[in-house]
Amino acid sequence: MTVPGDDLHADLEGGWCLPPPAPREALHTRSIVCRSFRRDDGMLDIDARFIDTRPFAYDSEFRGHCPPGSALHHMQLRLTVDRERRIHALASAMPGTPYSGCAEVNPNFQRLLGLSVDRGFRKELRERLGGSEGCTHMLALLEAMAAASVQAFASNAHAPRRAGQAEPVRIWRLEALVDTCWSYRSDGPVMQRLKSR
């Protein structure tokens, strides 16, 4: 499914605003992509993938010969979250892993059902899936998804609605934003404008 704006995330060479680099050669690319969708039942799906590639061929003790651009890590998750940001369903897949047994951890991710992706998510995630009970890369992906869920709910509040669709949930509170970043500093122009509403 292609949606407007996807091209901004697909072009690895365009769109960079950094100063020109010193002479260099490519070694590794990691991409984490999170996409959010409003379901007909009012819940939100957040689909995400984590991919690591190397632009050159190499030999792996565990996977044999790996051609240029093959995925060292290719992991995917879908979280279905309700209006309170609780996980109702979770699907996971690992089409590319460094070791053949990595995907055996997939059933463990079901331990997250019922958990809120709100405050405290990172701590609870580590308690349920830390160490040998989880996967470092999937935990990084889950943390990115929790952060993306904030924008998913914000986008849902602005998205056009069909007749009969539930009103959106507004998940942020002004007091929770104060001093969380430069733009939300308590004495800055953004916060002053938001407080004056």
Image (tube, rainbow, N blue to C red):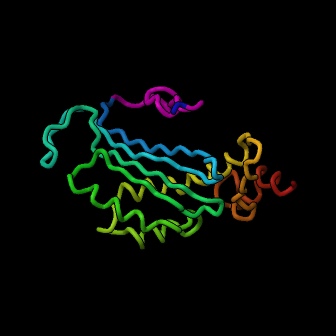
In the foreground, 28 or 86:
86
Q: Residue furthest right?
A: 196
Direction from residue 103 to residue 188 in the image, left or right: right
The residue located at (27%, 49%) in the rendering is 97
Q: Residue furthest bottom?
A: 127
In the foreground, 116 or 41:
41
- 105 is higher (above) or lower (below) than 14: below
The residue located at (73%, 44%) in the rendering is 158
Q: Residue 129: x, y in percent? A: 38, 68
Q: Residue 122: x, y in percent? A: 49, 66
Query: Magenta stretch mostly in which secondary structure?
Result: loop
- 85 is higher (above) or lower (below) than 161: below
Direction from residue 145 to residue 172 in the image, left or right: right
- Answer whether residue 141 is visible to the viewer in this image: yes
Residue numbers of the magenta segment: 3-23
Q: How many discs appear?
A: 0
